[in-house]
Image (spheres, rainbow, N blue to C red):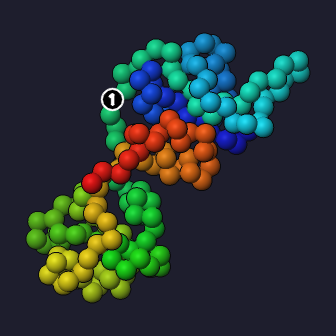
């Protein structure tokens, strides 16, 4: 029972990822509808067998305050595919302020990127334009759906149809 279950609000907005035990309780209490199952997996009791849910949708809309994705080093590296955004190296990664703090740059999703130590030192206290460095992609603020889609590609392809419209990378 290691597979996770995606929980969607009534409007199909992803709001949580829960373990299968929680999903089964919600299903048996008729608080959710199962939209997709994991094929070839089931949950067995002494006298019953249940399909293993992959995606469930709440039967009543819940007003969930937008929490956003926390700006952490780990989430930043994840957004940038664990690669330097200047040269593509996956080694010796650091965090770089596109507009340096000394020039008014903030620590925000749109001003931070993943950079290898070599490129970060080469760029120094300048903007990429000042030193002639090009970024591989423009930094953006990811959504929860963006990270869920990345997880789904590796661990839960059953989620992808429910995330595809909401997980598009901006810009």
Please say if 119 is above or below 73: below
In this rendered view, identify the residue nearer to me: 120 or 13. 13
At x 26% / y 77%, what residue is drawn? 134
In the picture of the structure, the residue carrying the numbered disc 1 is 65
In the rendered image, the residue lying farthest to the right is 46
Is residue 17 visible in this depiction of the protein?
no
Left or right of 164 on screen, residue 96: left
- Which residue is drawn at the image coordinates 29% and 72% (left, top)? 135
Q: Residue at x 46, y 68 (%)?
A: 82
Secondary-structure class at tag 1: loop
* Residue 101 placement (x, y as % from top left): 17, 69
- Residue density around tag 1, few if under 14, some if 14–19, many if 20 or more, within 10 Å: few
Judge whether residue 56 can be spotted in this image. yes
The residue shown at (41%, 23%) is 11
Q: Where residue 26 appears, x then y in whole percent? A: 60, 20
Q: Quadrant of the N terminus?
A: top right
């Amino acid at each position: 029972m290691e597979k996770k279950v995606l929980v969607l609000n009534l409007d199909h907005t992803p709001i949580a990822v829960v373990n299968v035990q929680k999903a089964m309780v919600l299903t048996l209490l008729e608080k959710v509808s199962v939209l997709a199952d994991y094929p070839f997996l089931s949950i067995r009791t002494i006298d019953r067998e249940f399909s293993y849910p992959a995606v469930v949708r709440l039967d009543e809309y819940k007003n969930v305050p937008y929490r956003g994705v926390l700006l952490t080093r780990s989430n930043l590296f994840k957004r940038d595919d664990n690669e330097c955004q200047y040269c593509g190296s996956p080694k010796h990664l650091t965090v770089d302020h596109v507009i340096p703090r000394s020039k008014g740059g903030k620590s925000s999703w749109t001003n931070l990127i993943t950079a290898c130590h070599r490129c970060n030192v080469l760029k120094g206290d300048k903007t990429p334009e000042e030193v002639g460095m090009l970024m591989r992609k423009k930094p953006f603020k990811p959504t929860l759906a963006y990270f869920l889609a990345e997880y789904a590609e590796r661990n839960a392809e059953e989620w992808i149809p429910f995330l595809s419209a909401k997980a598009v990378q901006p810009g």
